[in-house]
Image (tube, helix red, strand yellow):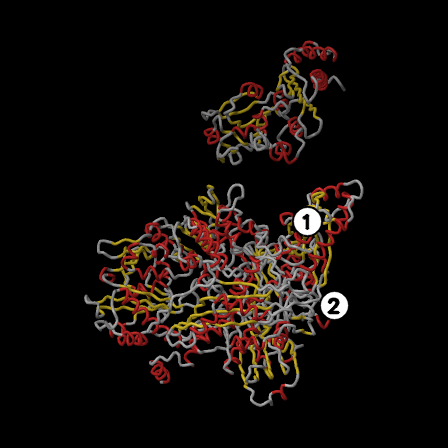
Amino acid sequence: MAKQYKVVHCTVNGKEIEQVVDVRSSLTDMLRNDLHLTSVKKGCEVGECGACTVIINGEGFNSCIYLAVWAEGKEIWTLEGLTGPGGELSDIQQAFVDEGAIQCGFCTPGFIMTSWEIVNSGKEYTDDELRKALSGHLCRCTGYENIFRAVKKTMLRHLGKYEEAELVNSQGITEYPEPMPFK
Amino acid sequence: MANQLLMAKSPEEAVAAKNASAVFVAGGTEVNRLGSDAAAAADTLISLKKCAGLKDIEEDAGFVTIGSMCTFQQLVESEKVPSYLKEAALFMASRTKRNMATIGGNIASKRSDSYIIPTLMAAGASMKLLTAGGKEVKTWVGEYIDEGDSDALIISVTVPKDMKVISKRYANTAQSHAVLTMSAALGEHGVRLDGAVKNVGLLHFCDLEATFREDPDVSEDKIIEMVRVCTGLHTADDMFGSDEYKRYLIAVTAYDLHKRITGKEV
Amino acid sequence: MYDIKALYEAESVQHAVQLLQEHPEAQILAGGSDVLVQIREGRRAGCEFVSIYMLDELRGISIDEEENIRIGSLTSFSHITKDPIIQKYINVLGEAVDMVGGPQIRAIGTIGGNTCNGVTSADSASTLMAWDAIMELTGPDGVRRVPIKDFYIKAKVVDIRPAEIQTAILIPKESYDRCFGHYIKYSMRNALDIATTGCSVNVRLSEDKKTFERVRIGYGVASPIPVRAPSAEEFINGKEITDENIKTFAETVLKDINPRDSWRAGRALRQHISVVMAERALRESISLAGGEING
Amino acid sequence: MSNKYIGQAVTRLDAHDKAMGRIKYTDDMCDKSALVIRVLHSTVANGIVKSIDTSEAEKVPGVVRIFTCFDIKEKHYFPTAGHPWSTDPHHQDIADRLIMTDHPLFYGDDIGAVVAEDEVAASQALRILEKSVVYEELPFVLDAQEAMEEGAPLLHEKFPNNVLAHTEIHMGSVEEAIKEPGLIKCEGWYETQPVQHCHIENFICYAYGEGDRTVVVSSTQIPHIARRVIGQATGMDWGKFRVIKPYVGGGFGNKQDVLYEPLCAWISIQLGGRLVKLDVPREETFISNRIRHAIKYHITSWMRPDGSFAARTIKAWCNNGAYSSHGHAIAAKGLNAFPQLYPCDNIDGETWTVYTNRSVAGAMRGYGMPQASYAFEVHAEDCARAIGMDPLEFRRKNLMPVGYYHAFSKNELYSDTFNQCFDKGAEIIGYYDKVKKYANQTGDIRRGIAASTFWYNTAVYPIALETSSCRIVMNQDGSVQFQLGETEIGQGADTVAAQMIADTVGIPLSMVHPVSCQDTDITPFGTGVYASRGTYTLGFSVRQTALLLKEKILEAAHQFTRMPVYNLDLIDGKIVRTTDGRELMTIGELALSKLYTTEGSQHLTAESTYQIKSNAYSFGVCFAEVEVDIPMCRVRLLNIVNVHDCGQVINPLLAAGQVHGGQSMGIGYALSEKMMWDAKTGRPLNNNLLDYKMSSFMDHPRLVADFVENYEPTSAYGTKGLGEPPVCPVAPAIRNAIGQATGVYINELPLSPHTLFREFTDAGLINDPWRKEEQGKEAK
């Protein structure tokens, strides 16, 4: 069977892209191999670990189980797109650095993209909602703690709640309401 | 950088697409070269690679007709092509370039260091063109050089098979451009002299022809003096040589070619 | 890179049907969160696919002339959860699909794909079963409507005819009117997981909110395909809202479900959990419907 | 030595690049022209490969070459453990692995390899190949104790009854001691499960020819050791290989073994040095790399009414899987820890490491101690309950006292670590109030709280060689690059080393740059990172090398300032005359002058090796508070607090990160992670990230990490190991908390719904009335 190729027109990190791809390619393949955006990582290639997450039209997707040809007409953002022209980090990237949310760094690109979507949503997530919004990413180094801090702080800062943001690190122990026993 | 490539399938299609901002690409050694002005100006490249019917060499009644897309190497290897034209073709020293460069391309670029135009002019070669309007036109190489229609497509060049023609080329190395390429041919009405003078142009030395015709035994010094003072010739000092050197070179070469072509020297 | 023999991209529903007719071997590719993974595992390697992902006409939720809630088959889980119509009339479906995998999976996964792969663990299926959803299928002979309980035939096999695609899922007014429901997904971890058992209950109470007018309960992974528990429903319908009745209702589900014994979970555990979930989902539904127990 | 950077929460040096996404891991560096290798794995748990028909697979377009176990002409058996090589044959690791074997010993063993132009062609050919292997299937055994019985299938001739090793310890006389009247006996069987590292970057390496040598770029924790093992595996000179380690996406011990580097190098060599890449898919990472040892314990203690131990015995069976890898070291470490954590005069202990037809167990964060800590601390809880004593008080009474000295390892407990940690942890989580509050609950949903501790040491002295080398090179502007054998795998080794160098040499941290990626051609020899040795061992060579460099700097300063060396110092990048504090010149001026002077020009550099001959106890505790939904058999972790004594903390932010990571791995170990095999076929059942339940973001509460800083006297910077300790106490703490909440104390892991359902049913907490009818119905 002859190979099928297609030109994909989309914007990646703000730049118009026309890329010929083999229709069998995943979006991860196109981003990594054709566009050299190696921040997009492969951890499982079956949509479980989240390391390949990119933002497509404002929503986070696992690019490993997203066909490249589906990117037609879409607006895609990867971690390379978040950094300023002079290499300046966006506030969510800086928060990951400051809060020690980065160790081996392999899950970091995926996590930052989803966090970027969260902090720019303008919504105030409760702690549980925040955990759920970030639950599409697996990490083995950090136990998610400093990632939680980095995202919550940046979210609160985006909402202008600066004092509350500074308290995030000190909230170690959580007091839970009495369980409503199903009697 | 051109941003559209047209793979013309026929000469008609090629000329139909031709306009001020479109450039024919034959072998590509001229247009595709880094820094070539032709390509820079062009919006569209019209490639003749796939054009049918421009690659044949035919012999008919003492004349050989060569398709414009024939490469120099094709010329060198063809039995039909007269040896005087092969010698000129071999002035292009690089085998790889000969595999690409085409006859039509070389003529169309009208370079003042062309390998083969002086030989073709001396031999009185004729050309078939296809004008933008799709009309076939016949002309002489000399005429085409002077005011050929650059939007027309060269279809073929026709040369006399058995004519005595000798050419000479002066360049620092085999690869570098020639300061002078000159040819002499023995036609019905005497010796014809043509040449390519770097940064001056492709010239028909009719004054010299006339001088030789009038006095076949004219002295070399006279010829040297004649050329030295000739105001019609616009040579100048440049990296290829001084004005005096070029004039002297033209003179002695013309004298030598005339002597050899007319068989004086045994 | 995927081991795909050929990919045909549909531009419209008709075009998709036509492609499926031209390529009878080709399988349908919607969001791909299941299919693409199965290609990589080898199960669907080397097959031909008709991609319908770009068909925006199959996306979106509306209320049609017959007052059915109409969910386009390509609507993603995240868009279902956020949809105002869903939140108003059948919020439990939004909650159920909000438990599939992780946010990224919910952005790509479609409710059509989730139901058409015929898998009993599909988080949307048990709820759609409990709300008597109707599957709208479009094919060469036009549109066909199939109630969900006939749509699932056996494990991984659904009633889709050659060259047909599911274009919408309908919830009739009679099904959602004055009806409140709750879904519990029982899984080993709280995200990125497949249901060990899923239980969706919904209730319509009497005017005085003292008796059950109608109770429906659907299960995932309690049998090879998503199922209802008719015996339990029969018992409880019309009864008063009492602890006693709730308990009996929960235990009666065992008559209708037949969980299997596997390395993923033993039969005894699945049965026990199914009963506990039935009770809790019913209690939650009652409180959502404003009912009182032993009131 | 007043420190400017040590002790500060300095930002990781590579954090910025990682946040930008420009950091390069192995796959990011590999040229796209690389051929793709996919390994052909055995689909039998024990057998002989009779034949592999490659003809069909070779027809797949894009396939370049197919290798099988029959292409291995000379069988070079090699060890895979990331241990420093020993010149004493008795101490050398067991060399029982082949790059491809015709006698697979577990489902997933390596019997062949496909080399193709792209991954699609490779996987197509692999699927065909898998069907064209003819095996002579042999019986297999998966359980360690069964494998030791007579008649069980024998994996390795040299190891009768599949016993890789068996060691014992005996102190005093248990026989005599238990005759003492009034002793209370507490006995239990405890069992831990196999789990996998699940680093998010799978193992990956690529190889290519360079001159007459082969370069292997690999995601590894041990580049220098890998070079040695590749040489052993191919039977070639070790110098013929160059191993380069780029940034690594997590290792946790799996990458402390040499995995596919030898096979990848060998294939490149067979193909005349072509660039070949072996990228292990997640499903194969689970079964064909390394896993954690599943260990079964039987512990008995005899206690006096006052809670003191009269005598104790322990037996442990350690399931090693099909090949030796780290061998008996994991079991030995556990046994060695038993008499130290709760000292007792009369102890009998023995442990077996046993071969089974299962995935190979190797090093995983904790190296046997998470397993041992679970057994020790679960048993300790049961002992306390047996004599009706508060579990925390029972521990404080029996734990290793201050001043304890261990003759073999020369370890000494210099401070009252346990009590300090318990006090601090109890205070943070509010342990005492909650213990009372949760004393006796009756509802469906109950809460519990408990604490546990563990034994751990640092690095591997005296069991194996501990050596570290460092090179520091000063540039013309006074800034330095340093190179270390200890590899950065996400734990922050580069950053802590930079902090040490800045403070010891006396220059700003901004002038200190790690050459992060080890390259065996350039980087000074080092055995990599494992056994939480990083900060401790690199500290010795870093300090020694930094002082050497400083010496040269001050000698040069003497030349340009005319002041005697003993009146000079380098502080914060300035040459200072100590007598009056005057700043004479900057380090930049000095470096420039010394390099370009026409009088004795010298390149300021220092390199040295330090062989570490000391060890350091690194203890800590974990407090866990849980909520158990009994009917739903679910456990929710409400709060978790770890307090660790890892000596002086070099970087509090990075140290806390290590604790969080350990807590997370411990939570999964406690509640949900377990590798499973089909008993009938030996086939793995859940080797992917969906069916293997590693914790997600929603399975964790806030993680609290705190420290007690007792400066370690033996250490160059007062530090002790921290990488692995945090994993150890978490599972026992959660188990004990569930016990306090429900009264049900469970002796196995994981504490998943399946386990809780069985235990709660046995304990009567779950008694479904319909259960009897159901049994009735089933009986019919």
Picture coordinates of residue C219 (x, y %)? 33, 69
Give D439 or D653, whichever is nearer the viewer: D439
Check the image and name the residue furthest to the right: D599
Residue located at (66% from left, 84% from top): D172
| Horizontal relation, residue B65 to residue D471: left or right | left
Disc 2 packing (10 Å; few <14; some 14–19; many ≥20): few
Residue located at (64% from left, 52% from top): D514
Displayed quadrant of residue D362: bottom right
Q: Provide the residue designation for mark 2.
A: D87
In which quadrant is the N terminus of chain D drawn? Answer: bottom right
Marks 1/2: CA distance? 43 Å
Displayed quadrant of residue D236: bottom right
In which quadrant is the C terminus of chain D drawn? Answer: bottom left
Q: Provide the residue designation for mark 1.
A: D571
Q: Is residue A99 above or below residue C272?
A: above
Query: Which sits earlier in the primary sequence, circle 1 or circle 2?
Result: 2
Say what amino acid the circle numbered 1 marks: Ile
Give C52 or D343, whichever is nearer the viewer: D343
